[in-house]
Amino acid sequence: YQRRVRGPKIKFNSLRLPYPRVFAMPPLDRENRVEPQPEDGDTELGPMGRHQNEPAKKIYKIDDVLQYLGKVGRFQIVLIILMSVIASIAALRILFDLFAAKNNFNWSCTEEGEALGCIYEEEKMPCDISNNSAIEDSTGKIGNGLYWTFNDTRESIKSDIKMACKDKSKFTLTSSIFFIGAFFGVWGFGRLSDIIGRRKTLLISLGICVLQAWVIPFFKNIYVYLACRCLDGAAFGGYFLIGFVLEVEYAPPKYRNTIGTALHFITSIGMAMIAAWGYFFPLWRDYAIALAVPPTIMFPLCFFFAPESPRYCLAKGDEKEALSLLTKVARTNKQEMPSNCELYEDVDTAASLTDVLKNPRLLRCGLINMGGWFMTSLVYYMLWFSAKNLAGSIYVNAAVLGVAELPGRVFAFILMEKVGRKASFMASMGLAATCVLISAYDNATCRKVMYGFGKALSGSLWAIIYLYSSEMYPTKIRNLGSGIGAASARVAALIAPFIGDALTHSPIIPYIVVGVAGFLCTVTFFYVPETGGKDLPQTLAEFDNLFHKKKPDPKV
């Protein structure tokens, strides 16, 4: 070797290389050497047998591939339909108690009850009358069926389950227990989806929804009912949030705003439809069975048609599976994948809640995001639960409240197209807080008008905060970050019914407190980045790039 190479001799021992002092290199047999042969269709080979005309690999990010494939195609349309039906199911499950546990005013006192002083009053349940509660306390017996009877106990679970008046507060927990389950569900399923994938977690949460939905109508026990409602809330925290994230991750950047807003538009329609379900199924068990059918149908459909997220696969290092999923998108949409495509693999391998706490920017955005979720939910459910005293038919009121959100969804879509996510949220929250403050003015007409505008604006806030959160966090913690934010929204939903009850005692202070809190939340959003027109961040480094003051294109 030293004889063949001109120049100074190399002392291998002095360089401490793991090679022997002398190399025995065989002489080159130029006459008998076998040259690499070109394949069919190739005319020339380069050095080391590589084809001269072989194109180099091109590196793409997932957003680049989705943008390359063009507009929303058949694949995205099928996914949108699936997730829209799931969003409607979520709306029906949230408002399940509205008609299942409604007040049943069709009752009368028995002869034995009248002898003990039972009193009937219109638009009141038996236990809402102090004389009737006193009869139970004095005799130690349950009055339902003994001192008073309902004309048809099957109309509501409140009349079907015989409970003492002192236990009637358990029925008030049915709405709160749902959001307790949702509080743990959005965090638990959000974290689980980052571990085992979006598709598996979606199926698990939807399966829990189906299971409890079929248990409720066949048990006459308040504790079974409360347990099922808690599981119902936990499942809701899974399939609704994950379905939204999955839909957004498959959306081309240009159409992400449209697809995200459409899902919440369908949710509002589902809330308006709850009145029709309650009207056509007046008996609570029939109503419960009817509402158990949609998730039962959706489970096998999601099993066969719901895809895994390519971003999740790429974050886990499975580039082959991510490329296969994108190839399926191209094939379904009748498009061609980019030639020699190689996906961008710069993703974090250990992003977790610890990374959120260590990164000051990520921690700050996470806390502000939680505040946004909290105030969105508080304004929305405060208006919903405090509207229970509105005069008129319960079916008409429920339909109107649901329809009132539709203009807000359209407003959110237009506003995000024009000014981006950040300014849209700040404008909607500021206007909603203004409506709440004006509602403190004791005028029935003014309050109804403000409730209508407040419901529309709170509907726009839901559409914005879901999309904003899904675009802000890196891939490895996107569901975790959105899940923690949604969990704070469930805390607000737990508080909202108590605010609605507080308004009956103090009709001014609750409005002022919520309105001022809404303005404070608006101010904090000055310190979060705009995400409109930017690629979804894959890593913590790309998240930091969101803070670069590059003017975004709000139409993307």
Image: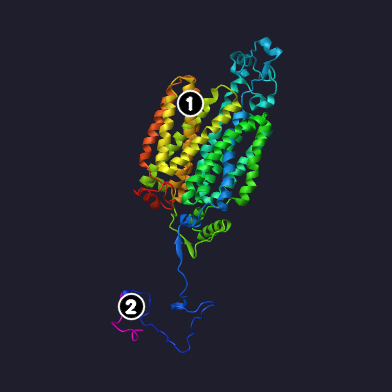
Quarter in which the N terminus is drawn? bottom left
Decide: is 465 above or below 348.
above
Q: CA distance from mark 1 to mark 2?
A: 89 Å
**For numbered disc 1, what is the local secondary structure?**
helix
In which quadrant of the rendered view does residue 105 lie?
Answer: top right
Nearest to the observer: residue 369 or residue 402:
402
Magenta residues, dominant SS class: loop
**Residue drawn at (51%, 41%), measured in percent from left and top?**
186
**What x and y, as percent, mark residue 548?**
34, 49
Q: Residues within 10 Å of mark 2 (few under 14, many from 20)?
A: few
* Magenta residues, start to end: 1-14
Q: Nearer the viewer, mark 1 or mark 2?
A: 1
* Amino acid type shown at disc 1: Val
**Residue drawn at (55%, 25%), measured in percent from left and top?**
388
Magenta-colored stretch includes residue 289: no
**For numbered disc 2, what is the local secondary structure?**
helix
| Mark 2 lies on residue | 12
* Amino acid type shown at disc 2: Phe
In which quadrant of the rendered view does residue 429 lie?
Answer: top left
Decide: is 435 above or below 63.
above
Name the N-terminal-most of marks 1 and 2: 2
**What x and y, as percent, mark residue 278?**
64, 30
| Mark 1 lies on residue | 449
